[in-house]
Amino acid sequence: MIGMVKRYKVSLAVILLLAVGVYVWNDNRGFDDSAMAAVPRHEGLDDRSILLSEDTSSLLEPSYYKVLSALQAEGALDTEGFEARIRSVDYAALSSEGAEVQTAPTGGPQQAVALSEEGGWVEYELEVPASGFYQMGMTYYAFPGKRADVVRSVMIDGAYPFFQAKKLDFGRMWQESGEPWYDNQNNEYNPPRSEVSDWQYRDFVDAGAKVEEPFRFYLEQGSHTMRIVYVREPALIGELRVFSPRRVESYETVRQSYEAAGYRPTSGHLIKVQAEEAVLRSDPTLKRIEDREPDTEPFLPDSVVLNAFGGLSWRDGGQWAEWEVEVPESGLYELGARYGQWFLNGIPVQRRITIDGEPPFREMNAVSFPYKAEWQISAFGPEEEETRLFYLEQGSHRIRMEVQVGALGEILERVTDTTQRMSLLTREVIRVTGTNPDPNADWRLERNIPNLVPRLQNMAWEMDDAIRQLYDFGVKQGSSEASTLYEARDVLLSLADDPAAIPARLTQFSELQSALGLWANGLSRQSLLLDYLIVKSPDQPWPRPAAPWYERLGTSVADVARSFTKEYGGVGTVYEEDEEVLDVWIARGRDWVEIIKQMIDEDFTPETGIRVNVNVIPAQQMQLLMLANTSGLAPDVALGVEGEVPIDFAVRNALVDLASFDDYDEVAARFRPGALIPYQYNGGHFALPENQNFYMLFYRKDIMEELGLTEADIPDTWQEAMDLIPLLQQNGMDFFYPHAPNAPAMAINEFAPFLFQNGGEFYSENGQRSALDSPEALEAIRMWTGLFTNYRIAKQADFYNRFRSGEMPIGVADYSTYILLSTAAPELTGWWAMKPMPGIEQADGRINRSTGGLAQTGMIFRSSDRQEEAWEFLKWWTGADAQERFGSELEALLGVEARWNTANVEALERLPWQQSDIDAILEQWEWFREREVVLGGYFTTRHVANMWNEIVLNGRIHREAVEAGVREINKELRKKREEFGLDREDREERQVRQDREDRQDRQDRQGRLDAAGGGEEP
């Protein structure tokens, strides 16, 4: 050992020095004054002046922060002493559709206005005595429905006062319906959560909680109209409230009032309220979760105990949970919580805390929970300040904690605005250089783009100011969460120093914009984990925040030792191997599988008497199934199997032909006929689809309206889409069609709609030959690649972020984009829509919109000796009732981002989609069609991507690129069919065919050489 140290002493010394250097650098990196010391600020420069007419943000209302700042700069002040309450039935006008007066449930007015569908609105007249700021709110009753929040917009005097007024959220209430349940391993599971229907009041606040207080609306003295517009989910309006801004006193003022009232600290009380026992929550995804830290209460070493609350799912602005605490005597108490906040590195998260519906003092509007990689105790205030006291009367109280982005909202807006200006600048550069600029050319950007360098420097200052604000907010020096802003600032400075390098670095500049968009999304997610709330007398010590390191180490060692004997693959109740049990493997996440197992134990087994063991296998690790089948250990049923996999097993005679069951046709009718195509082989049917992907056309309604386009102008055909592209590009925008250059396997799905809509096929002769050289396929290739060559749409783009910014207000995308827009773009709620993707008009006037999207399947292994039971299980699982319940349970557990895109048509209609969305999806599904999966089909996938590259990137003629690819595809198809004994030809025929193909290849290569001006091929 000593000899090795001597031998490598120089290397070890270098490594040690580097480690120390990295540590010191990381510990000291922070706000760098010197980076901006010599960079001027250009006050008064209009960063958007060059493309102001093409800046899509100018089509929309300004943000709340901008409106508020401008009004305050003009001297606008809060009004005082005013409050008006307007009954909903005292309206001035009511829309003819989507709005009506109804008898109201108990607990509110006898009658109320219901806004129930798109197009519904109600308008009120309001008289205010003075000019200034007012706040507003509304009582409402959410009809039991589709779990999503009620969303309304508010217009004042016929206009939206700011962008955020287009989306006001009014949440629902949820509670646990029953006690947690346990499997036969003594593991705990969450009980179901059900909606609580009741009247609620909510101020008009920012939907993303990026503003600490309710919105301030500026009203001139006199009469005004206020219109409430339906955006999403039906609900009753009880009354509207308009009032002078509330003044919540500071803690110091409240403390002095305690002294004046003679309130005294209590003594001897320490109350812990277990966070997992929340009585109400705003979202069904807020649930009990497990934590393995020994001090987390309660704790069992050998079982799963759901002993904490929140975590990653408790992150979105406006989400809240409420706890009930019984106070033994009136007096002053200290309040706090044991929490874990290791989600945002170096950045505190915030919660708004109310007691019995009101913040006890101003500081409770935004309580910070600092970052640390272990459990902490919070006294609901800064550590450096004296612990705050709360006066509580004897009896029951409700403590509510609501996610608050607060002061971070202004920082996020600064970064987002700068990102949009960076996007404008990118478009200006492309206007000068084109989409594929020569990096060595002198483009004279400073001459062609006025104020180029000052604009870059101002953007760098914006990023620098955002970094400074982060540190003022409480972000730790060196936090990795600030690194994106450092990078953006440094890139902007380097481009300002060397503008000639911009064309060569345009890709980096665009990627940086996407990174900033993702950064802003991530920072607005304020996750927090709670163990318990604390209500204690000041003379009682705070509980210790975390177990000492040796206790945590002991728990970890015990968990590792237990892992050698405990079966972690099984889920829920596990039956002994010698029992008659169906074995089901599922390639999905454990949360998903736990829901399925619970459904099996509650529904399937009691109904059929068939007991089921469920095991989790890693998603997209299908080689495990192949190995299990080869070794004779295959399960009876596999779920979550990727769509191209069943045929790989079918050709090996490893699957049961589902068509052999008498009721197969009845079961198959649950799905669109085109969804079953990939699972057919040699006359058999070897899998059933569980879910399916699909493409739709997404568009921004607000931007389309600003461009003068109505709903009828949204493209139905590809010709209409191509006619729209020039209009978009003239206004600095673009159309999106997906292409993933770094994922060649996706190209075949991007091409398939054009092929099917033109009447083409991927294969002929039952999968023996490629049909991509047919006239229909060649036309499809021409249309597909023509979008990128003739119309010059972006070859690669972050559609989600560019859709949000307005740069790409319309485009084709898949189901994942729907989920993103539904969950991660709250500011666009109600201002985007989707419809079936464009198609090709047929002779009979119908529009062929054919498209598909392989997803996951279920299949039965031939080696199973319980095939009938397996079929009963597969029928139950793919049925409408099971699919509806699974989709509902999954969304209740994980949120809208986990919405189940079931392949069962009836179940899809039952799930909580907006009606306009489900109508569009079902219309698209009328043309749903999957592609065939054949032996050697992976070569088709590869060469379709190659064709796009050759035509779009290399300028090759369509027919040449296609014919070269088809020859290679046909070779592989024949090779695979021969390998599995499907084709037989004698040696002489094979040699003749091979010689002919080799000769054609040589002719093609020589033709390319001739075209390039070269000589003969060697």
Image (cartoon, grey):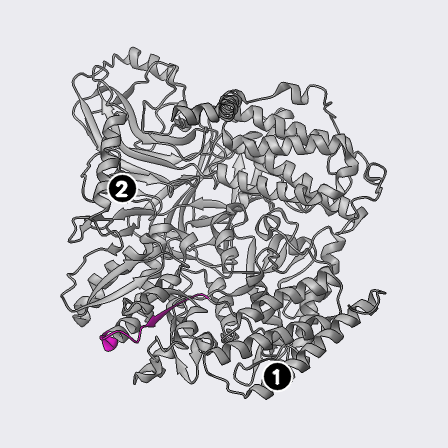
Write down the residue under mark 2.
290
Image coords of residue 21 (percent x, y): 53, 22
Q: Is residue 847 above or below residue 465?
A: below
Image coords of residue 615 (percent x, y): 27, 59
Residue at far front of view: 3
Q: Quadrant of the N terminus?
A: top left
Q: Which badge, 2 or 1, is on the more N-terminal residue?
A: 2
Q: Is residue 645 above or below residue 82?
A: below
Viewer-side residue, 987 vs 623: 987
Q: Quadrant of the C terminus?
A: bottom right
- Mark 2–mark 1 Cα distance, whole angstroms, equals 65 Å
Write down the residue under mark 1.
991
Q: Is residue 46 visible?
A: yes
- Badge 2 marks a residue whose secondary structure is loop
The answer to if 859 sits in the magenta stretch is yes
Amino acid type at mark 2: Glu
- Region in magenta: 855-869
**Residue 619 circle label:** none
Q: Is residue 226 visible?
A: no
